[in-house]
Image (cartoon, rainbow, N blue to C red):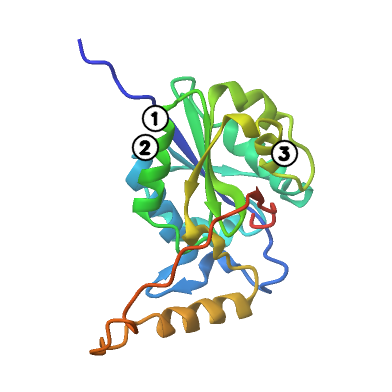
Amino acid sequence: MAVSEPAVHAIVLAAGEARRFGSPKQLARIGDRPLLPLAVARAVQVAGHAVTVVLGAYAAELTPALRHANVGLAVNRNWREGIASSIRAGLAQVPGSADAVLILLADQPDVTHDDLARLTGAWRAQPEWIAAASFGGVVGAPAIFPRWCFGDLQQLQGDRGARVILQRHMERVIRVTMPSAAIDIDTPEDLLAREEAHRAAVPAPLTQDPEQNAAAPGVPESLTLAPDDAD
């Protein structure tokens, strides 16, 4: 008899008012797609339709953007409390069959399906451990929390997200290298800087000098905790 692999339910956090952006940043376009549908599509790629999107400040404006996504919606009416209330609202929608939750932020546009597949793969290899992204000396979201963490997640308060749980259980965290998670969009300037960086990253034609074509050496990371400011 085949043993089924552990089940993960994804929670996409998109309830914040985007005060620094000045408008619903969840609808800011990355290429030809808004941020929120892009994040939801990637969550669906790794979790199927076991996805809950937490809306709040702009629930009325954002709901139409998800009309074609076969996912669950949770409206956090306490969004002014901060990111902790959104995590609790999402967790309330997670079925008992889920072995873990994957917490995603809607404003990390460069996190890819491959990134999330590596994260879920690392967790499934050790399903009693937390798996979290490691980037630029930081450990944080996206992150997967096994069911034994649910009580801690439900106790979160204020504008403090799951980083306190990562800190509390750091000896049981699998760190998955994910440079793409370093990019988040909090202001219009962040969006512009990302667009400019992507244009600059278009590879130039290779020269005939092999030394000029050599990759730069990697820099080892020293890990800290990511701030919870992206809801």
Q: CA distance from mark 1 to mark 2?
A: 5 Å
Which percent across, then down, holds residue 94?
51, 29
Q: Which mark is residue 121?
A: 2
Q: Which mark is residue 124?
A: 1
Position above or below: 41 against 144? below
Q: Which residue is mark 3?
A: 164
Which percent across, then down, holds residue 52?
49, 41
Q: Are marks 1 and 2 in contact (CB under 8 Å)?
A: yes
Which secondary structure lies at badge 2?
Answer: helix
Three-letter amino acid code at the position of disc 3: Val
Q: Residue at x 43, y 55 (%)?
A: 66
Three-letter amino acid code at the position of disc 1: Arg
Position above or below: 26 against 224? below
Mark 1 nearby-residue class (10 Å; few <14, some 14–19, many ≥20): some
Q: Residue at x 52, y 72 (%)?
A: 28
Which secondary structure lies at badge 3?
Answer: helix
Position above or below: 25 against 170? below
